[in-house]
Amino acid sequence: MIEALVIFFSAAIVNNFVLVRFLGLCPFIGVSNQLKAALGMGLATTFVLFLTSLVCFVVNQEILVRLNLQSLELIIDIVVIAVVVQVVEITVKNISYDLYNALGIYLPLITSNCIVLGLVLLNTNLNYNLFQSLVHALGAGSGFTLVLVLFAAMRERLLLANVPAPFKGTAIALITAGIMSMGFMAFTGFTGSAI
């Protein structure tokens, strides 16, 4: 149980995929204008991370390893990610059309979000079992959602702030992201080991 908490906390905070590993910056900047869209994107990405970790682990271990086809792992993982994202896109469209419209082009772009592929490859590289992979996926998704929501809330406040003209818009957003990144990097080494 302690190991699962360490893996979750490490993925969510200590080694946050956006602010520490610098993966998934496109949706981080693109969808963080509205709090609702940021929360929706974070939850959709968490769901995709969880499903792809599950399916990729099973396919890699039960099919590719048994048939000695590990060299196809990257190609198969990309196909699995694309299929899972399509399922999530159809589900979001049917459940909440407003959220689907708010996410716009960024929902299908989860397919190319480097967090998803990075997580699957990292799970394989760290030799995680199925349970550890799923905990890692939930931690990464929770950390992504947390950062996206915090950043969206800050951007909404920045719209009301008196920001000097040269820093308005994307410039102040990137400065804010840099400060957030430094804050998250303060947790480095907190879990006692680099996971």
Image (spheres, rainbow, N blue to C red):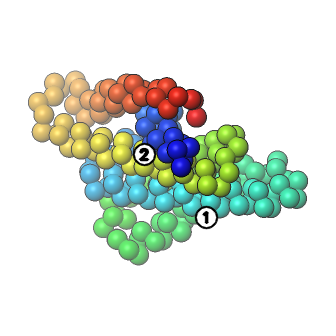
Q: Earlier in the sequence, mark 1 or mark 2?
A: 1
Q: CA distance from mark 1 to mark 2?
A: 21 Å
Left or right: 68 with respect to 112?
right
Give me the residue at 26% from left, 29% from top.
172
Residue at x 52% of width, y 44% of height: 2
> Which of the 4 quarters of the picture holds residue 81?
bottom right
SS for callout 2:
helix
Q: Are marks 1 and 2 in contact (CB under 8 Å)?
A: no
Q: Label 1 amino acid?
A: Val
Q: Could you say which quadrant of the image residue 130 lies in? A: bottom right
Q: Nearer the viewer, residue 170 or 35?
A: 35
Residue 106, image x, y percentages? 43, 53
On residue 83, the disc is 1
Mark 1: few/some/many CA within 10 Å (<14, 14-19, 20+)? some
**Can you say whether 77 is above or below 30 in the image?**
below
- Dividing the picture into quarters, in which one does residue 26 lie? top left
Q: Tell me residue 51's x, y (percent).
A: 57, 61
Name the amino acid type tagged 2. Phe
Q: Quadrant of the C terminus?
A: top right
Instruction: List x then y, in percent, for residue 90.
Output: 48, 71
Q: Nearer the viewer, residue 32 or 11?
A: 11
**Residue 13 in view of the camera:** yes
Residue at the image point whose x is 33% and y is 64% from the top: 99
As displayed, is residue 104 above or below residue 115?
A: below
Secondary-structure class at tag 1 = helix
Please give the residue where the numbered disc 2 appears in the rendered image. Answer: 144
Residue 18: in sight, yes or no? no
Q: Where residue 120 sits in the image (x, y, percent)?
A: 63, 48
